[in-house]
Amino acid sequence: EVRLVQSGGGSVKPGESLRLSCAVSGLIFTKGWMNWVRQTPGKGLEWVGRLRRRSDGGTADYTSPVKGRFTMSRDDSKNTLYLQMNSLRTEDTAVYYCVTGGGDYGFDFWGQGTLVTVS
Amino acid sequence: EVVMTQSPLSLSVTLGKPASISCRSTQGLVHRDGHIYLNWFQQRPGQSPRRLFYKISNRDSGVPDRFSASGSVTDFTLKISRVEAEDAQIYFCLQTTHWPYTFGQGTRLEI
């Protein structure tokens, strides 16, 4: 069974930082790209970024709202994906999901979601 | 950025009747590899999205066959042949052909 278990959400003030984690099991982590997606009642679902697997360069792409402030990384030895969020803004308040997608895997496995509140 | 526009945004359907949701993109979704990466998702409030279809019409495991999906290039449709109570959820289209990947606004299906 594939599981993506998220941790690290919470409530912070504007300008502060937070790191989210996503522990993956049940698939070969190194074969897939990984993604972060966020959801708000107002804006709906929004892509945050994608992180290639090491064999595809291991680089990341980010969407405009978070570029320069958020950084995705992965620890293949721990099968874990991270999202470092700096200089948080009130508009970053959302439920954040880690998602498989790219490489050998489709966008069919999602974490349980973690709420980040910036206020 | 490719904008995905769903319609309607809200849909009220009688049990046992059909339902149809449209999703249109502002650019063609044909990838350079020739595939069209259009996905459909279903989501209950408070839960993670669940993928129903990928590459327009490929049904995910466990998705009832009353659901079908079709379309091409810029126009896509999700259909439910006979709506059941458990189908009262929110449905999203997602394109993963062009970066950044983008979702439709979501369609709320009510019974």
Image (cartoon, rainbow, N blue to C red):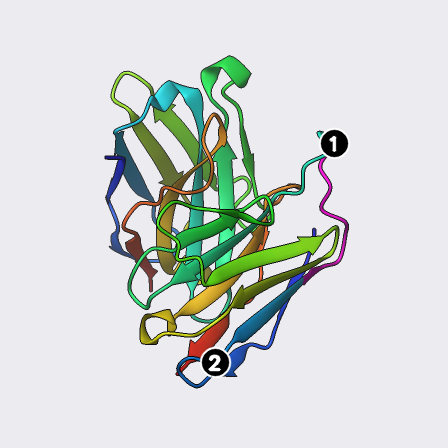
- Residue at point 46%, 62% (across, down): A91
Report the side of A72 relative to A11 (left or right).
right
Q: Position of residue A18 (x, y in %)?
A: 31, 44
Of the 4 image quadrants, the one containing the C terminus of chain B is: bottom left
Looking at the picture, tell me which residue is in the foreground, B26 or B39.
B39
CA–CA distance between discs 1 and 2? 39 Å
Q: Position of residue B69 (x, y in %)?
A: 57, 57
- On residue B32, the disc is 1
Report the side of B50 relative to B68 (left or right).
left
Which residue position is annotated with label 2? B17
- Residue at point 33%, 55% (across, down): B48
Report the side of A6 relative to A65 (left or right).
left
Amino acid at circle 2: Lys
Query: What stretch of residues is rendered in magenta?
Result: B24-31
Q: Position of residue B32 (x, y in %)?
A: 74, 31
Q: Residues within 10 Å of mark 1 (few under 14, many from 20)?
A: few
